[in-house]
Every structure is written in C-alpha cells, then in structure tokens.
Amino acid sequence: MSWFSKLTDGLKKSSTKMSASLTSLFTSKTLDAASLEELEDALIEADMGPKTAMAIAEELSAMKFEKDSSQEAWRIALGQILVTRLTDVAQPLAVKEENSPHVILLVGVNGSGKTTTAGKLASHFKAQGKTVMLAAGDTFRAAATEQLQSWGQRTDTEVVTGQEGSDSAAVAYQAMQRATDAGVDVLIIDTAGRLQNRSELMDELAKIHRVIGKYDESAPHDSVIVLDGTVGQNALSQTKAFSEVAQLTGMIITKLDGSAKGGVVLALADEFGLPVHMVGVGEQVDDLQSFTAQEFAAALVGVPQEALTQEQA
Ligand SMILES: Nc1nc2c(ncn2[C@@H]2O[C@H](COP(=O)(O)OP(=O)(O)OP(=O)(O)O)[C@@H](O)[C@H]2O)c(=O)[nH]1
Ligand SMILES: [Mg+2]
C-alpha cells in the first residue's frame, strides 16, 4: 500500500466524520448562518478545536461557488484552506552536517509512541546514508531499554543504555560522549513517558535537556514532542507543558491510522506554529514519514492529493 493510501485510510475516521455533515451542506452556492454553524460543528467533530474550526468555516463561507458546484468543489476548497494553514509548519526533520552529532531528544506523555518513533527514525536516517546512535533515556523500566534495544537490532543501530533506575540525565550525557567519540551523524535520545502535571518528572526532563546542553551548548538540536494523534485536544495542553521544560522545536504525531481526531493537527498548528516534522500511521518501521501539507489535507478531506496545490513557502 502506498504511503498516501495508508494516510488516507488512517484518516478515514476523521474524514468520514466530517463528510457526513459536509455532504448535506455542500449543495448550495454559499453557506447561510445555519449551515456555517453546521460546518463549524463538523470541523470541531474532527478535533480542530473551536477557535480554529470557526476561523476555517468563516474562510470557506467567504468563498463563492457556482450555483450547483459539486460537493467535490467544496471539499477541494476546504482542502486548499487546510494546505495554506499547514504549509508553514510542514518542515522535515533535517540533520545538519555542522552538528556532530546532530542530537534529537524525544519527549512526551506515556505511550505516545516515543520509543517506536526513535526506532523508526533510526531507520529513516540510515536510509539517507547517515550513521545513527540511539540512547535509552527511559531508565524507569527495564522493559523500556529492551524495547529500544530490539529496535536497535531491527535497524542495526547501536543503543547506549543505563542501569534500570539509574539517572536518565546521566545516560543522556554518556550517550553524548559515546556518539561524539564514535563520530556518528545523528543521536536520538528516547525518554520515559511522563504526564505533564507531574512536576517532579517534568523537572527531571528539564535536567536531561540541561545536561545535554552542558555537553554541547547547541544541543539538543531538535527537541521533539511525540504526540498521540488519537488524544485530540489534550495534545494542546501536553505541548504547552512540555514546551516549558524541554524548549520544544517541533512535533511528531503518531497513530494517525485509525484516529478520528486527525484534525487536531490544525489546532496545534494554529496554537503553537511549531514545525510538524513527521506523522506515524502504524507500528512498522516504514510507518513514519515526513509531513506534507498537501498529503495531509487531501487525506483529511478525502480528495486526491493532485487536487490540491502546494503553496510556495
Ligand atoms: N497504530 C499505531 N501504533 C503506534 C504508532 N506509534 C506507536 N504505536 C504503538 O503505540 C504503543 C506505544 O508506543 P511506544 O513507542 O512504546 O510509546 P512510548 O511513548 O515510548 O511509551 P512510554 O515509554 O511508555 O511512555 C506501542 O504499542 C506502539 O506499537 C503509530 O503510528 N500507529
Ligand atoms: Mg517508551
């Protein structure tokens, strides 16, 4: 299955949720007040959040259509609005050669997909011909280290580990040394999941971030929050809390396969404007790809991606 069909399939729950409401709307030339509200509701249903939904609905209602414009035309117009809103945040996770190594710190709440994403990223960069090292910064559970080690085996990547219960900042520091000595291009540091309201765990994350910066003041070069794409609006409060301790530079959204809440990416873009680097649509190594505005918008509104043109940034 192609990546785009996977994404479209994955987002089907989000798009059909919108579609049902949209179908009844998109039969007229313009939207009246009642149908505007219905459109807003449809966008909120897809988890775009009230503020973003309202703004998008208004943008769409300002557009004029031929009297019997097809539903497809409305859909494409909506898709185009989404492309415009997502183009700036769609930025690849780029490894800069001047960083040796280029350090990527992965953070997020429990179960959001950090460890899986670390493994997938190792494979992603290796496919680009880069040398990669992984660091098992989750020292809470022995199983967490084993899980990353198994990704290390699968992707043929060295994994720096610490003892269970040891200081995760120390593991991060040790990994910085090891990766520098080995001269690898990319170091990916996994961390333990933590709820954003557990202040002692958030303090520990701030310490990990600080310790990495002590070794190389330009690091981490990417501090990326891994968000579960099925949690909806909670992703907003997670991003806010983690940005306070880990100086986030970007996000990766996982589990968009089967999420009915894919629209949350629009709310995130609106609220934070942080780069969305990649999206995950499954548990396999290839199920992580760079985020592009056109693909995502097309999958979300259910039109072919050729129907939407990419804005020039
Ligand atoms: N369907 C699907 N499952 C995913 C995706 N990414 C991760 N998962 C699954 O989500 C579960 C949790 O993933 P992990 O990578 O262990 O998450 P984590 O953030 O490291 O979890 P903690 O270390 O416990 O905080 C696993 O079963 C993964 O296989 C995705 O894009 N799609
Ligand atoms: Mg993990």
Image: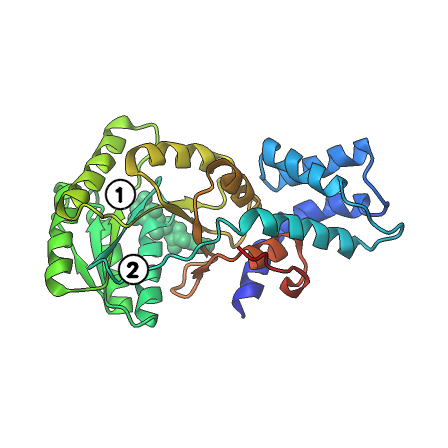
Quadrant of the drawing holding the N terminus: bottom right
* Residue 252 in picture, x, y percent from top left: 41, 50
As helix, strand or loop, the secondary structure at mark 2 comes to loop
In the rendered image, the residue lying farthest to the front is 313
192 lies left or right of 183: right
Image quadrant where residue 140 sits: top left
Q: Tally the numbered discs.
A: 2
**Residue that appears at 37% across and 50% down:** 113
The response on whether ligand 1 sits within 8 Å of label 1 is yes
Query: Which of the two residues, 282 or 51, is positioned nearer the viewer here?
Result: 51
Q: Which residue is mark 1?
A: 192
Query: Would you call the spot at circle 2 few (<14 residues within 10 Å), some (14-19), or many (20 or more)?
Result: few
Residue at horizontal 52%, vertical 58%? 292
Q: Quadrant of residue 235?
A: top left
Instruction: From the image, tell me which residue sits under label 2.
Output: 96
- Mark 1 burial class by Cα count in 10 Å: few <14, some 14-19, many 20+: many
Q: Residue at x 16, y 48 (%)?
A: 216
85 or 79, which lies in front? Answer: 85
Q: Are marks 1 and 2 in contact (CB under 8 Å)?
A: no
Does residue 80 show up? yes
Residue 193 position, x and y percent, is: 30, 41
Visible residue check, residue 259: no
Taking the image as shown, residue 93 lies to the left or right of residue 175, namely: right
